Image (spheres, rainbow, N blue to C red):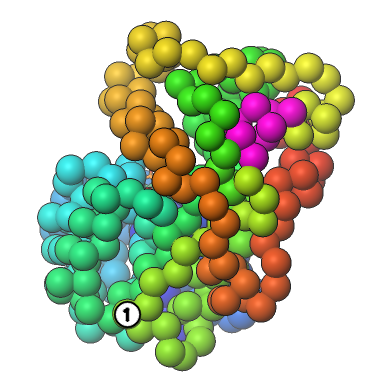
Amino acid sequence: MTTFIAGGTGKTGRRVAVRLHARGITTRIGSRTGTPPFDWDRPETWEAALGEADRAYVAYAPDVAVPNAPDQLSGFGKAARHLHAITLLSGRGEPQAKQAEDALRDTAPHATVLRASWFAQNFSEGLFLDAVRQGRLALPVGDTPEPFLDADDLADAAVATLTEPNHEGASYQLTGPRLLSFADAVQEIAEAVGREVRFESVSEAAMLDGGPPDEIDLVLMLFRELFDGRNAHLDTGVQQLLGREPRDFRTFAQANEEAWR
Ligand SMILES: NC(=O)c1ccc[n+]([C@@H]2O[C@H](COP(=O)([O-])OP(=O)(O)OC[C@H]3O[C@@H](n4cnc5c(N)ncnc54)[C@H](OP(=O)(O)O)[C@@H]3O)[C@@H](O)[C@H]2O)c1
């Protein structure tokens, strides 16, 4: 068995690769810096990158909600339709992400979809890391709660869909076990690290000079769309796929406190 991992150097792809290696499964890491390279914007790179793979984990970049995603995932599904299994990482409650899922399934109907809530690792290895380290995270979101999901649980679930039978064409909603506002999550981190970290709810305008314009636009779009209450509930995809409870945010924060020192 050989598994192609699109986004194999990212938060979830890296974890999926480690788990597959531990089971003796060969991986091909898809990234722009891989050998051979894999680039969503250069379809001519896809066939060589897939090589002899017979299954694929797909973490689309930069985000399943961007306008290019449906076209590129439809093209990828065509190139990868011969694979035994394809698992797509998607977002929960996002109409644009659903369009991207549908486009992949138009050409690869057997694809499995994992709709994940926001990752706890956005605070420890992603977008929010620097701000949390500096002691102040400011975002255009109020107290709408989110069931943050541990990327380790997502990776365990992805491996289950790639290595066990009967997941073809299925969709799963994966969340953590507890609803937390961003302020609650930051408080959990502050307690784990043992120093003050503040959360501030700010206007969109206050975000605009906070980083690369493309990245900020994407974050604003996601916050606008996702934190209106539609995702403020728990789902059971982790339990369905793994037969156990997802990891709690407090356990995540305690295990990762070095990231914020
Ligand atoms: N963050 C969340 O809370 C969350 C929740 C639900 C769903 N998602 C979905 O998760 C996906 C991202 O997965 P992730 O968080 O595991 O990845 P990530 O940590 O954001 O890393 C991105 C990965 O994609 C690669 N990449 C970037 N641009 C690329 C391009 N043009 N062509 C090919 N590869 C490219 C990167 O490698 P190189 O830079 O070396 O190319 C890297 O391996 C998105 O589709 C997002 O919608 C995220």
Query: Residue 117: x percent and y percent?
Result: 50, 51
Of 207 and 134, nearer the camera is 207
168 displayed left or right of 10: left
Q: Nearer the viewer, residue 195 or 143?
A: 143
Dot 1 crowding, Cα within 10 Å, few <14, some 14–19, many 20+: some
Is residue 248 shown above or below 53?
above
Q: Decide which of 196, 38 is in the foreground and name it.
A: 196
Given the current orientation, which residue lies at the most extreme right position? 194
Q: Amino acid at mark 1?
A: Gly
**Side of 168 relative to 45 (left or right):** right
The residue lying at 21 percent from left, 65 percent from top is 102
- The quadrant of the rendering that contains the N terminus is bottom left
Residue range of the region highlighted in magenta in the rendering: 180-187
Which residue has dot 1 on it?
169
Q: Position of residue 228 (x, y in %)?
A: 41, 36
Give the side of residue 21 with respect to residue 214, left or right: right
Instruction: Judge whether residue 152 can be spotted in this image.
Output: no
Majority SS type along the magenta span: helix
Q: Secondary structure at mark 1?
A: loop
> From the viewer's perspective, is 259 left or right of 114?
right
The question of residue 146 being in magenta is answered with no
- Ligand 1 closer than 8 Å to label 1 CB: no
Looking at the image, the residue that sits furthest to the bottom is 165
x and y, in percent, of residue 68 in the image: 17, 46
Vertical relation: 190 (above or below) 250 = above
* Residue situated in front as seen by the camera: 88 or 84: 88
